[in-house]
Amino acid sequence: MSSYHRILDIPPGADEQAIKKAFRKKALQLHPDHNQSPTAEAEFIELTIAYEHLTSKRNHSAPATISENERIRDEAKAYARMRYEKFIRRNTAYERLSIHKIFWGKNVTVLILIISCVFMYDNFAPKKEKTLSGFKVEKNEAMSTRSSYNYYKVSGDGISFSTRDGYEVLKSRKIIVSYTPIIGVISSFRSDYDRFTREYSPTFSLYEFTFLPVVIFVVTLVTLLVKVRTFENKLLLKFMIIIAMITYLIVLLIAKL
């Protein structure tokens, strides 16, 4: 086995397709994001020399002289260095790309930060209350058929929500609803069906999802204040914001329905 085959880690009889496949695999291993070794450039040059030598048409012709071999090696080395420098320049361009030029700009990032603050305030601020003196209770057939429980829809004074606590609601004279101060999502309600005032939760509550605005706020703040170096981390942060925003908006939509 020649040194060229050993560099590419292929058998001596490998065809051109196998040589190209081995070259691509080795080149990825020498990518600056995966290989911080100071010898990466030299290894890349050696890899390209081996690739050029094994795929060159000269290898299928008459044997070359020593001087011809030296000339081919010098040409391959210069070509390898040129490819490596181009490879580094392209990679550096991605690394230097501002995170605010990926998907949306800095102004939109600031707007998302403000919106996340509004969401957090809405979740953690004292709730508003409203007494439903005249309300209607109906069995929610759509939800009941998909579950072993009976669900009831309570509506009145422009407010509606579903609950499993139908007996308590049916026996109540009045219902006091607690809801978030800005968006108006119902967080709980109290019923006075007996001498005790008890608190219940609607079928769908925001309580399990209050962490999402916090995640949006923290990740967005990181994109504004921290200098993220790698392109992959910049993409990861932007995707985290997108996923958290979409998830929370869907949750709000369901909670309001």
Image: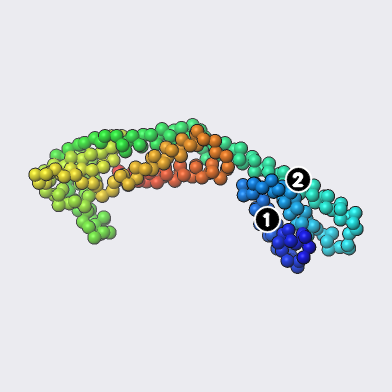
Element carrying mark 1:
helix
Badge 1 is on which residue? 26
Query: In x, y percent, where is residue 209?
Result: 34, 45
In the image, what residue occupies the spot 26% across and 42% down?
A: 187
The image's colour scheme reads: rainbow
Query: In x, y percent, where is residue 135?
Result: 16, 43
Most foreground residue, 91 or 103: 91
Identified by mark 1, the residue type is: Lys
Crowding near pointer 2: few (<14 within 10 Å), some, many (20+)? few
In the image, what residue occupies the spot 23% across and 39% down?
A: 178
Badge 2 is on which residue? 82
Where the C terminus falls, by quadrant? top left
Q: Would you say residue 158 is visible in this rendering?
A: no
Query: In x, y percent, where is residue 169?
Result: 15, 48
Most foreground residue, 228 or 6: 6
Most foreground residue, 144 or 17: 17
- Relative to 78, 154 lies left or right: left
